[in-house]
Image (cartoon, helix red, strand yellow):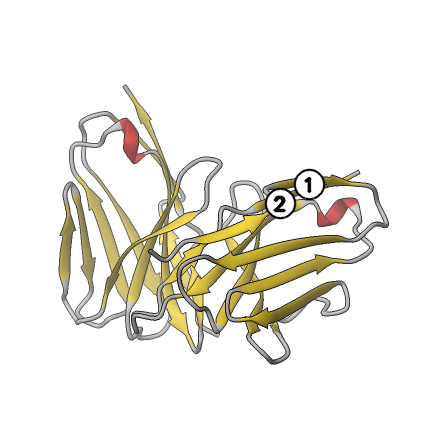
Amino acid sequence: GQQVMQIPQYQHVQEGEDFTTYCNSSTTLSNIQWYKQRPGGHPVFLIQLVKSGEVKKQKRLTFQFGEAKKNSSLHITATQTTDVGTYFCAGPNDYKLSFGAGTTVTVRA
Amino acid sequence: GAVVSQHPSWVICKSGTSVKIECRSLDFQATTMFWYRQFPKQSLMLMATSNEGSKATYEQGVEKDKFLINHASLTLSTLTVTSAHPEDSSFYICSAAGTSGKREQFFGPGTRLTVL
């Protein structure tokens, strides 16, 4: 079955630095979605990418969908303490979503 | 828009009792809702898909007789953990499928279940 993998599992970042988290699917995806879960909270939908090679920005967050539509990345610039949390990518699997294991981000001031 | 609520937010129960968790879409109609289970520092594990007016579709390995799902209306789905045991202690989260065509999911705040 479809598998969605994310790396790294943990990302410890100095405040102000940039980092990237990666998502890879075992199958071609019709779209890729990204969610953020703050500590103690629930996942919140961030964005969906549909087109091959698509790039979308949300302030300091840049999301990219690979040309083959099997991988995606999330790049955060100038990391802030508000970026703390776990970022999940998810790909449609029939009527469901297959979630990656998530990248948990911690920030040191 | 797209607000999903869950009740209760946390519950502590004795082993052997049953616990019902409600999931409501507050400002939209959700024909499809999903129930997930999340262990600490782990990803979301889909338990079942709840469809209004029909039987839920359970994922492999999830006992349908233990985790009863009822989706009686377009805004309410319930999950009942029957004869709960300590190993059922977990964070249970529901989500509702969006209606914009994007197929994104809107998550409830979750219910933390502790079985003593």
Q: Is residue A54 left or right of residue B105?
A: left
Quadrant location of the C terminus of chain B?
A: top right
Residue depicted at x 55% and y 75%? B51
The x and y percentages for residue B16 are: 86, 50
| Frontmost residue, B64 versus A89 | B64
Looking at numbered disc 1 in the image, what kind of residue is underneath it?
Val
Looking at numbered disc 2 in the image, what kind of residue is underneath it?
Pro
Residue depicted at x 14% and y 56%? A56
The x and y percentages for residue B3 are: 41, 54
Quadrant location of the N terminus of chain B?
A: bottom left
Residue depicted at x 51% and y 70%? B74
Residue closest to the far top: A109
How much space separates mark 1 and mark 2, taking CA atoms? Answer: 7 Å
Residue closest to the far right: B16
Residue A77 shows in the view: yes
Q: Is residue A13 left or right of residue A5?
A: left
For label 1, count other residues whose C-alpha is less than 10 Å away and answer few (under 14), some (14-19) or many (20+).
Answer: some
Residue A3 shows in the view: no
The x and y percentages for residue B4 are: 46, 54
Q: Which mark is residue B8?
A: 2
| Frontmost residue, A105 versus A22 | A105
Q: Which mark is residue B1?
A: none
For label 2, count other residues whose C-alpha is less than 10 Å away and answer few (under 14), some (14-19) or many (20+).
Answer: some
Residue depicted at x 24% and y 54%? A73
- Tell me the SS state at disc 2: loop
Q: Are marks 1 and 2 in contact (CB under 8 Å)?
A: yes
| Frontmost residue, A58 versus A6 | A58
- Tell me the SS state at disc 1: strand
The x and y percentages for residue A33 are: 31, 61
The answer for which chain carries disc 2 is B
Q: Is residue B41 above or below residue A71?
A: above
Residue named by callout 1: B11
